[in-house]
Amino acid sequence: MSAEQPGGTTQLNQSWAPKEIIVVDDASTDNSAKLLCNYAERGDIKYIGLNTNAGVANARNIIIEAAEAEYIAFFDDDDISDVKRLERVLAETRRVEYIHPNLSFISHTSRRQIDKYGSTRIEKPMGCVGDNNIVIIGGKRLAMYTLSGYPYTSGIGACATCCQMVKVETYKLLGGFDKNLRRCEDVDLAIRHAVNGEYFLGIGETLVMQKITEGQEKTAEVVGQCMLQVVEKQNMFFAQNGNTIALRCGSMVNI
């Protein structure tokens, strides 16, 4: 991450104070290390500096292994979170856990994306159509939709890591993010979660502003190659289920 980016310190300003803030510096080349060390010396954060850039999946896995709290919410350096993001998502997460105590799910919110020209769009989480819509969605049918585009109207939307809140044990049970993927690691994790028959809690409220940045790992070619890797990883899923899985599996629960 870069502490010099606008979203580099939004974790410190949340209305619900997190138990811990873990920051991984993935071999930044700016002034981030110095700034982050200052925060660490004051006890505001736990700082982990890497000598070699190994990609976002590796950085996220380091955070998962270092976490001592029950939940994780990722804050990317080029995103800005609403000050009530943790408070709102945790409240909805605990409410659904009370109603469905045996359900394993990933919570995620809407995000406002801003491109380099200043144009904006709202990216809704899977299953949500309105600002106040809160939906549980998932199952193998969702995995088939994500992998093949097979019709599944309620699945339309995203599950970006920068908008998630998840129990640490859920990430660990999935084996974390695939560090062989330089991009699409969040799509891969969501698919693996859905293939296991698990669920997603979509919160329609827009609580993250994401600035779309450019880079060598964000080109259409790289993203396309990584997405092919993601699909190829699920060859066994296709072989075992075929497209008919989309007709008879999965479910959606409005709450």
Image (spheres, rainbow, N blue to C red):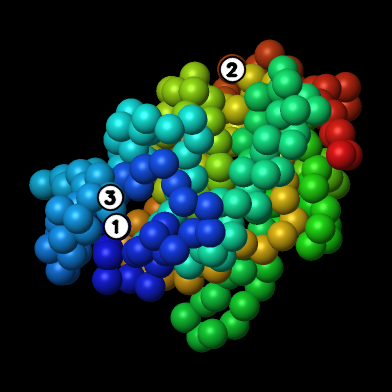
82 to 133, vertically: above or below: below
Mark nearest the camera among 3 and 1 is: 3
What residue do we see at 67% from left, 44% from top?
Answer: 91
Q: Secondary structure at mark 2?
A: helix
What residue do we see at 28% from left, 53% from top?
Answer: 44
Along the line of sight, which residue is nearer the eye, 26 or 70?
A: 70
Which labelled disc corresponds to residue 236? 2
Q: What x and y, as percent, mark residue 165?
A: 56, 42
Q: How many marks?
A: 3
Give the Cα distance between marks 2 and 3. 42 Å
Along the line of sight, which residue is nearer the eye, 234 or 210?
A: 210
Circles 2 and 3 in contact, beta carbons < 8 Å: no
- The amino acid type of the residue labelled 2 equals Met
What residue would you read off at disc 3? 45
What residue would you read off at disc 1? 1
The mark that comes first in sequence, 3 or 1, is 1
- The amino acid type of the residue labelled 1 equals Met
- The amino acid type of the residue labelled 3 equals Ile
251 to 236, vertically: above or below: below
Circles 3 and 1 in contact, beta carbons < 8 Å: no
What residue do we see at 58% from left, 57% from top?
Answer: 85
Q: Quadrant of residue 144?
A: top right
Along the line of sight, which residue is nearer the eye, 187 or 29?
A: 29
Q: Is residue 203 left or right of residue 226?
A: right
The mark that comes first in sequence, 2 or 3, is 3
Q: What x and y, as percent, mark residue 42?
A: 19, 55
Q: Is residue 231 left or right of residue 57?
A: right
